[in-house]
Image (cartoon, rainbow, N blue to C red):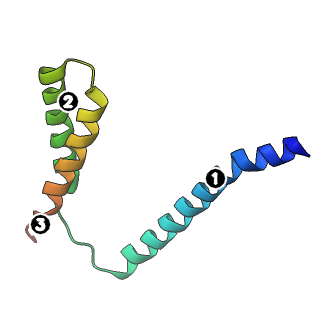
Amino acid sequence: MNAILEFVHAALPWAILGVAVAVLCVRHGGQQKQEKSRQDYSGEGMCLGMGLGVALATALDGTEHLGLGLSLGMLAGMAIGACVEKPHP
């Protein structure tokens, strides 16, 4: 009985996380079809921010915090790119 209880304690958070991600993906997909999507530069900003974050992390700290520079640069680039709207054709 202890083995089953330990398994449930170990697997239950992962199962809940999987269900939550599935629900969020389905909700987001349904909202995108209903709304007119706004075009912005979030993808381009994410790529540029990732490159700059890696370059700054390498230049300032070596390879110690490369992952942190990568993720923070990507986040900052996406946030800046999402604020700039693409012109309509």
Element on which disc 1 rests? helix
Task: Confirm or deny contact between disc 1 and disc 2 (CB under 8 A).
Answer: no
Along the line of sight, the residue nearer the viewer: 23 or 68: 68
Residue with the most extreme top position: 62
Q: Earlier in the sequence, mark 1 or mark 3?
A: 1
Mark 1 or 2, closer to the camera? 1
In whole angstroms, how far apart are the C-alphas of marks 1 and 3?
Answer: 39 Å
Q: Earlier in the sequence, mark 3 or mark 2?
A: 2
Along the line of sight, the residue nearer the viewer: 38 or 27: 27
Residue with the most extreme front position: 2
Residue 62 appearing in the image: yes
Question: Looking at numbered disc 2 in the image, what kind of residue is underneath it?
Answer: Val
Residue 52 lies left or right of residue 69; in this view the side is left
Along the line of sight, the residue nearer the viewer: 88 or 48: 48
> According to the image, label 1 marks what residue?
13
Question: Looking at numbered disc 1 in the image, what kind of residue is underneath it?
Answer: Pro
* Other-residue count near label 2 (Cα within 10 Å), few / some / many at <14 / 14–19 / ≥20: many
In whole angstroms, how far apart are the C-alphas of marks 3 and 2?
Answer: 26 Å
**Where 88 sits versus 67, above or below?**
below
Q: Earlier in the sequence, mark 1 or mark 2?
A: 1
> According to the image, label 3 marks what residue?
85
* Other-residue count near label 3 (Cα within 10 Å), few / some / many at <14 / 14–19 / ≥20: few
Element on which disc 3 rests? loop
- Which quadrant is home to the C terminus? bottom left
Task: Confirm or deny contact between disc 1 and disc 3 (CB under 8 A).
Answer: no
Residue positioned 17% across, 42% down in the render: 49
> According to the image, label 2 marks what residue?
54
